Image (tube, grey):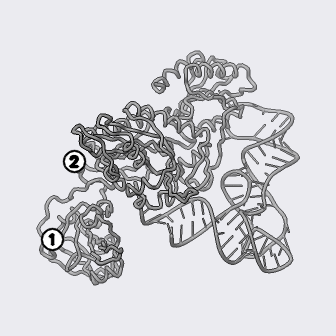
RNA sequence: CGGAGUGUGGCGCAGCCCGGUAGCGCGCUUGCUUUGGGAGCAAGAUGUCGUAGGUUCGAAUCCUAUCACUCCGACCA
């Protein structure tokens, strides 16, 4: 590609509303242009990157045996009503009406349509297993779009859907996708980590997220550096920090703690470790009649060690809380505890279900609110001062240094950007009454898995992970161009022009994706542009080095260029880039 | 959705408090000079000041409404 006939549109200053580095660099490099909140034009330079990512994804999907199809961006509401997600999805799903007032949606994902395709076209176990995938625009009406294409409303996703006749097959399909994802992200040159994930709203059994490691990531990843345990924060299991409960050594004493409503303040006042305090979180659940009126409210007290945080996803799994809960109102708290928030505790309660975190359940001589304003109890002990907790469960977030649940070390935490997600055991075929005929001639429900890769998010994540003060540093596999030929004085010097054109043409003829910057910009402007855009390999050609029979070769990450003989540069590049072209 | 804020040329911003008919830097156009890391000089072009009302002799500036966008939070995956 010749720069003079391509479209390079760079900015010195990023638009004021960009806040993360990938968004700023993509805007400055002229890869995207904002059209509305969370909605972007993909400009020619950006589209090339997206196409590179898509290509790798397609190749690995095909290698894994998935078959490409394409479902419509606009889908009829009926299918979504059938699966129950019309009601469940909420305003995140954009709904539209056609001229006949019929309901449609802009697809946020395609489980229903794929299940419907299965229903129409798959009749026999002989047609299984099968895995369909597509690369399609998605729309999710995020309440607050941000971070450019990392959390946009419109985005491009690769989504695949597998169907199997039995659990063994479903497992194989899942593993095949998992392995394909590992290959995809390796080929794209990203540092990433697959982590166990909660199945969340989509439902299902097994689930992993593929997380690109970046300090600016929205997700916290919990992993064990000395084993292969890794999970996201929602999922990461916390074992009890104290294996057994020590014998009480202190009497329970009602201690004045005026104005100290936080565990931190109480610990400071009493000069004790924060880990000796217990914090109280009050939740409420409601029973409703058919008309939706509340007929009963249950109050729950969740106990977490003072230095820990509640994990709402885990709390949501407790029997009784799993139908949905809310934080109790101040009025409900006062009527159940006889006390305002800030001094709440589990001692002397009735009519409240006490749920203790695993670590809290094994504490002794702990400090907790006395259910009296300005007082806490010290020296509290289970069994002696209050009944054993009704429920003991893992309800907290993991912290750095916790023992790994596999017993093979301690946990560490890093941040990541979720670029892929695999699920198995989806409920949609059952909900939609979809079957095939099994070997025994009887109808069976297929086992469904779904597998997503956020194509546009991969692009942003790659930049978050690979940039410097000058701009983007593309992994070669997704760079808009693999190599750029940068002549100094292209218009002025016939020697430079001849050498540059020759190298450019040789690279082209070897099938290498090369850009020649023949815009005849000043060297400073040209080189700054090329660094901002982030092309990984650069050959600078100028009269100065040509006199010595050299050109300057520099990788985007290199501090200094290296002199290479004119006659050798094409061969050297071809060797470096060969692994990519296959 | 709650809170805060911003809309002025392609981008970044000033002007608004204290009304008098719009300015700076970058970019863009033309010419000359310059040419190995974001050039210099000269001449230019580009804005119904988000939109709609209102107040006023006069509104970018004050008032009201509205739209868009951003940030923080909640929510969601």
Find residue A100 and report its horizontal and vertical position in percent. Answer: 56, 58
Chain-order first, disc 2 or disc 1 = 1
Q: Which mark is residue A388?
A: 1
Q: Is the residue at mark 2 from the same chain as the one at mark 1?
A: yes
Q: Is residue A373 visible?
A: no
Q: Secondary structure at mark 2?
A: loop
Q: Which mark is residue A153?
A: none
Q: Residues within 10 Å of mark 1 (few under 14, many from 20)?
A: some
Q: Nearer the viewer, residue A169 or B5?
A: A169
Find residue A412 and report its horizontal and vertical position in percent. Answer: 31, 50
The quarter of the picture where residue A533 lies is: top right
Name which residue lies at 26% across and 72% down: A301
Report the number of discs: 2
Name which residue lies at 27% across and 38% down: A169
Is A316 on the left-hand or right-hand side of A407? right
Q: Residues within 10 Å of mark 2 (few under 14, many from 20)?
A: few
Q: Secondary structure at mark 1?
A: loop
The residue identified by callout 2 is A406
Find residue A367 and report its horizontal and vertical position in percent. Answer: 23, 73
How far apart are the alpha carbons under marks 2 and 1?
28 Å
Q: Chain of mark 1?
A: A
Q: Quadrant of the N terminus of chain A?
A: top right
Q: Chain of mark 2?
A: A
Is A540 on the left-hand or right-hand side of A287? right
């Amino acid at each position: 590609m010749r720069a003079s006939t391509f479209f390079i549109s760079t900015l010195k200053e990023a638009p004021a509303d960009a806040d993360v580095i990938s968004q700023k660099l993509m805007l400055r490099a002229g890869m995207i242009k904002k059209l509305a909140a969370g909605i972007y034009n993909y400009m020619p330079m950006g589209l090339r990157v997206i196409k590179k990512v898509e290509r790798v994804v397609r190749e690995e999907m095909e290698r894994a045996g998935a078959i490409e199809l394409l479902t419509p961006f606009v889908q009829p509401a009926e299918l979504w009503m059938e699966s129950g997600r019309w009601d469940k999805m909420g305003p995140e799903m954009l709904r539209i009406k056609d001229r006949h007032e019929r309901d449609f949606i802009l697809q946020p994902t395609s489980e229903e349509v794929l299940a419907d395709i299965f229903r129409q076209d798959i009749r026999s176990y002989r047609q299984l297993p099968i895995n369909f995938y597509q690369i399609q625009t998605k729309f999710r009406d995020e309440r607050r779009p941000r971070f450019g294409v990392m959390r946009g409303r419109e985005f491009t996703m690769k989504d695949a859907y597998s169907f199997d006749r039995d659990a063994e097959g479903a497992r194989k399909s899942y593993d095949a996708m998992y392995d394909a994802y590992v290959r995809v992200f390796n080929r794209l040159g990203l540092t990433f980590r697959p982590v166990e994930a909660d199945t969340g709203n989509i439902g299902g059994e097994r689930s992993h997220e593929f997380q690109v490691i970046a300090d600016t990531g929205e997700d916290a990843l919990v992993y064990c550096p000395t084993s292969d345990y890794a999970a996201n924060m929602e999922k990461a299991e916390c074992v009890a920090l104290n294996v057994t409960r020590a014998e009480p050594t202190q009497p329970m004493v009602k201690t004045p703690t005026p104005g100290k409503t936080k565990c931190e303040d109480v610990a400071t006042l009493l000069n004790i470790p924060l880990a000796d305090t217990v914090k109280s979180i009050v939740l409420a659940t409601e029973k409703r009649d058919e008309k939706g009126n509340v007929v009963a409210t249950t109050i729950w007290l969740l106990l977490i060690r003072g230095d820990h945080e509640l994990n709402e996803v885990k709390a949501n799994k407790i029997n009784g809380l799993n139908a949905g809960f809310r934080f109790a109102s101040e009025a409900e708290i006062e009527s159940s505890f006889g006390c305002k928030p800030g001094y709440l505790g589990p001692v002397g309660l009735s009519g409240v279900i006490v749920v203790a975190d695993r670590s809290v359940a094994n504490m002794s001589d702990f400090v907790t609110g006395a259910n009296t304003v300005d007082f806490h109890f010290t020296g509290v002990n289970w069994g002696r001062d209050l009944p054993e907790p009704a429920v003991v469960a893992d309800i907290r977030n993991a912290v750095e240094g916790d023992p790994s649940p596999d017993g093979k070390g301690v946990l560490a935490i890093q941040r990541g950007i979720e670029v892929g997600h695999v699920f198995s055991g989806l409920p949609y075929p059952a909900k939609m009454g979809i079957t095939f005929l099994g070997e025994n001639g009887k109808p069976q429900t297929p086992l469904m898995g779904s597998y997503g890769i956020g194509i546009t998010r991969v692009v942003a994540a790659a930049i978050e992970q690979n940039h410097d003060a000058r701009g983007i540093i593309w992994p070669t596999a997704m760079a808009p161009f693999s190599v750029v030929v940068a002549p100094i004085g292209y218009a002025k010097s016939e020697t430079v022009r001849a050498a540059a054109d020759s190298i450019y043409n040789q690279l082209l003829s070897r099938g290498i994706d090369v850009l020649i910057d023949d815009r005849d910009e000043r060297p400073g402007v040209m080189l700054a542009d090329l660094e901002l855009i982030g092309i990984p390999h650069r050959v600078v050609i100028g009269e100065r080095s040509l006199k010595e029979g050299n050109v300057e070769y520099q990788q985007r990450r290199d501090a200094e260029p290296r002199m290479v003989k004119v006659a050798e540069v094409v061969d050297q590049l071809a060797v470096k880039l060969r692994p990519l072209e296959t």
